[in-house]
Amino acid sequence: MSERCWLAIGAAVYLSMARPAIARAQSTANAMARAQSTAQALANVDSLAAVYSAALAAEAEAATASARKLPGDTIRVGALLILTDARLRDITRRAAANAWGVLDKMFGSTARVLASERFVIRLEVPAPKNTMIPPPWVVAPATLPQQIELTHLSGGGISNVYRTPASNESLLADALSRRAAELIVPTLDTALVAWLGDASSAWTLAHMDREDVYRSLALSPSPAALDCLGGAITACRAVLALDDISDVVGTWYVSPESRRRIVQTMQSRIRLGPASLRFDACVSGRAASVCDSILRSLPREAIAPPLPSSARADFMYFAIGRGGAESFPRLNASSGSMSRRFATAAGMPTDSVVSSWRSQVIAAAPPPITMPTRTAWMALAWAILLGVVATRSSRWR
Amino acid sequence: MFRQIFLTQWKWTRAPLLIALLAAFSIPLVSLSRDMSYTQPIWDARDLLDRVRSTGVAYSALAAALGLVLGLSAWAADHRGAHVYALSLPIARWRYALYRLGAGALLLFLPVIALWLSALIATHVIVIPTGLHAYPNALGLRFLLAAIVAYTMFFAVASGTTRAAAIVLGCIGVALTTMILLADTAIGRSLIDWAAQALFAWPGIFGVFTGRWMLIDV
Amino acid sequence: MTDPAILTRDLGYRASTRFAIEGVSLNVPAGAIYGFLGPNGAGKTTTIRLLLGLLRPRQGQITVLGRPMPEESTAVLARTGYIPERPHLYPTLTVAEAIAYHSAFYPTWDSAWADRLIKDFSLEPGQRIASMSKGETGKVMMLLALAQTPDLLVLDEPTDGLDPVVRRDVLGAVLDYVAQRHATVLISSHLVHELERFCDWIGVMDQGRLITELPIETFKNGIKRLRVAGAPADLSGAPFVLLDRDARNGTESWLVRGWEDPMRGFLETRGASVREVLDLDLEEGFVELLRSFRRP
C-alpha cells in the first residue's frame, strides 16, 4: 500500500472520530498536515490509530451515557437498533430476532439501510381509547426522529405507530417487520414499486397469507386467473403482469361477462356524469359492445388488474426466496421486463418460478372451512352436557 | 317403551318437522337454482359465492328453529298435564327424560338428512367453477350439530319446573336489561363484548352457529 | 295378618301458605276397598299424590305395597293403577295409541282383558282422546288402569261428572276386577252415597287432616241421632262420644259416635231417658262428622 493511501486511510479514520475526541484529533491532524515528509506522516499513523481507539472508546462511553437516559433498554439485533421499556426487554429481544431473520432473508444487504434508524417500543398503560387491541398492554414500534432526544420519549413526536398486544411476540415481530419494510420501500427501484402497486405501501411481510392469494385467484373475475389456477402458466404470467401486455382488456377480460363484471367493480370511477348511461347499458343492459368500449376508452393504468397487489407481493417474495441470499438486491438492481428481473432474482427461468409459485398457492388452498374440528367437538360436548342436565331434571313439580 | 315414546313425539311434531324437512331440502337447491341452468363452468365465482353466503344464515336459523320446536314439543304434552301421567308411569325420571331426548334427537335427523341429500344433489347438478369446492358433508354435519345444540338447550330448559324456567329466563332478562342500560358506558361495552365472546366464540355454546355456512367455497 | 297396602305415619306437606297436609296417618288394609272421603279441597288429591310419589312429603313416612315411597316409586307404580282427578292422557292420541303407549310401560299388561274392556265400554279404538266426552275419557282411563292388572288401584274421583250409566259401568268394572284379583282399592270421592254401596273401609279427610278411619260398618253403626229427655249437662264418663247436642222443646237431639243400646243405662243413672234412636246413612254421618269437626 502506498504512503498516500495510508494517509488517506488515516484521514478517513480521523474524520470518522466521535465528537468527544475531535479536539484532540484535530490538533493531531494539524500536526500531520504540517509534516513535511511522508516518513513523518507514516510515523503519525500510529499516533492516529491510538487516537482512533480513544475516539471509539469515547463514543462507546457516550452511547452508554446516552443509554442511561433511555426509558428502558437498548437492543441491537442485526441492523435493528431498538429502544424499549425494561419490562419489555425479553419479549422485544425475541421479536427483534424474529423480525431481523425475516428482513435479512427477504432483503439481504438492502436491509442494512435500517442501521441508520432507531426503533422505539413503548409501553402504553392503560390502553388508549378507540383501539381494538385488547389490554393489558399496548406497545408501539416506531422510528424515532433523529432530532428528538431519547429522553423525550414519554411524550408524543413519534409517528407511524403500530399498536400490538405486548404479550404477543409474533405480532410484535410482525409490527417491527412491517415498519422496517416501509423504510426499505423508498430505496426500491421505481419500476418495481409501480409493479407492486398498493403492496409497496401496505407492506405485509410477516403475515403474507398465501391462502388469500388462492382465494383471490379463485374468485377473480378474470378468466385468465381461473386458467392460471387450472395450470396455464402463460395465464399466470398474464395475471401477474410479468410481461408487457399490449391489450390488457383482451388478455385479462376475454369474455363479455368478465368485462361486464370488471366494469361493475370499477363503478366509482366510471359511473360519472354522462358516462352513467353507458355504465347502465353495460351492467344492467348487458350490452357487451358497450362494456368493451368503456374499458377500451380507459387508460391502461385505470383498468383493475385480475389479482390484488398482495398477490404480486407474494409472488415477489416467493421468487426472492428461491433466489437465496442477495436475491432482493439483485432484483432491485436489475432492469428490463418484470419477467426477466424475477428470473434474475430467482436464478431460474420465469416459467419455473411461476409454476412453483402456482403449486404453492394451490397447496395453500383453504381446508374445508365449514367448521373447525374443535368447534364440532365443543358442540357435541355442549349437547351432552345439556342432555345430562335435562335427564337430571327434578321429578318434583 | 322407547318406540312408543318416539311414536308419540313423532305424532306431536310431524307437522313442523315436515315443514322443516321441506325447508332443509329447499335451501341448498334454491341457493344454487340459478346456477343449474349453466352447462359450462360458470365464470363468476364471486356471484356464486355471494349467493351461497346470502343463504348461509338460513341454515343456522333453520337449525335453531328446529331445535326450538323439537325441544319444546317433547315436553309440551306433559306440561299440559302437569307431568302427572309421566310421573305416574313406572319409569325412573332420568330414563324417561333420556328416552324423550333420544326420540327428539332421532327425529332431528330427518331434516338433517334432507339437507344433506339436497346439498349433494345441488352440488352435483351445477358445474362448480375452477378453484371452488363443494362441502355438502361438512355443511350437513354442521347443521346436525347446530340443531342438536339448540334442541338439547331448549329440551333442558323445558324439562325443568316452571320455577327453574322462570329463573333461567329471569337471569337472561336481567342480563339483557343490564347490557341495554349500560350500552353507552365502557363497562357496558365490555360486558356486551364479554357476553358475545362467551356465547358465540369457542368454546361458547353458540360457537357452532357462527362463522361461514358455505355449501360452496374456495 | 297381612301388611297394609298403604301405610303412612305423620305425613306432612305444605302446598301453599294457606293449605297443608298435617299428621296424616293412613292405614289401608290389603284387599280392602277404602273409601277416601272429604269435601272439595280437603286434601284428598294431594294425599294421593304424596302416596304415589308425585309430590315430595315434608315429613312422615309412606309405605305402599310394602315399599317405601317415594324411594321405590318405580317398583310401586308398576303394581299400581292410577286414575287422577283430571284426565291426564295425551289428547292427540287415539284410544288404540293410548293403549299401545301405556301398555309398553307395564310388563303385566293383559291385552285380552283390555280388548274385552274396549267392547264392554263401547270404545272406538280410532277415536282421538281429545274428541271424547268426559265419560268416554273416564272409561279409557279405567281401562288403562285395570288392564295393567295392578295390585293396588288408586282412583281419585273416578266418577266425578259422569252420567249414572257410565258411572255404573266404571264402578262395575272395578268391582269385577277386585272380585277376580283381590286387589286393594283406594277410591276418593266427595259423593259419599256412591261409596256406601261397596267400600269396606272409610277414611275421612278435612282441612288437610284425617278425621277418622274405620270399617264402614262401624262408621255407619257408630253414629246415631238420639232424642233424649231430661238430658244432663255433664256427660263425663260417658261410654260414647257426644258429637253434637241441640235442645228443642224440652228434649235434646244428640249426635253420638260409638252408641250401643246397653248404654241407655248410663243415661238413666243420670236421670235422662232415650226416646228415640235414629240410624244415619253414610252421607248423613259424614256431614255430621264434618260439622262436629269444624265446630270450634
Image (cartoon, coloured by chain):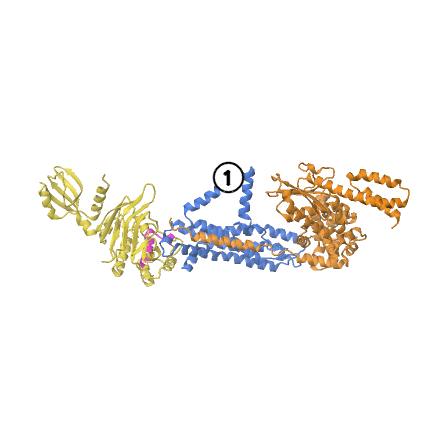
Give the percent coordinates (x, y) of residue A145: 73, 39
Query: Which colour denotes chain A?
Result: orange
Q: Residues within 10 Å of mark 1 (few under 14, many from 20)?
A: some
Say if the magenta span includes residue C267: no
- Could you say which is closer to the camera, residue A304 or residue B156? B156
Left or right: residue B13 versus residue A109 is left
Q: Which residues are magenta?
A: C129-146
Element at badge 1?
helix
Query: Which colour denotes chain B?
Result: blue
Q: Is residue B4 visible?
A: yes
Give the percent coordinates (x, y) of residue B109: 50, 57
Q: Quadrant of the N terminus of chain C?
A: bottom left
- Could you say which is closer to the camera, residue A301 or residue A282? A301
Q: What chain is colored yellow?
A: C
Label 1 sits on residue: B178
Farthest right residue in view: A36
Left or right: residue C222 versus residue B139 is left
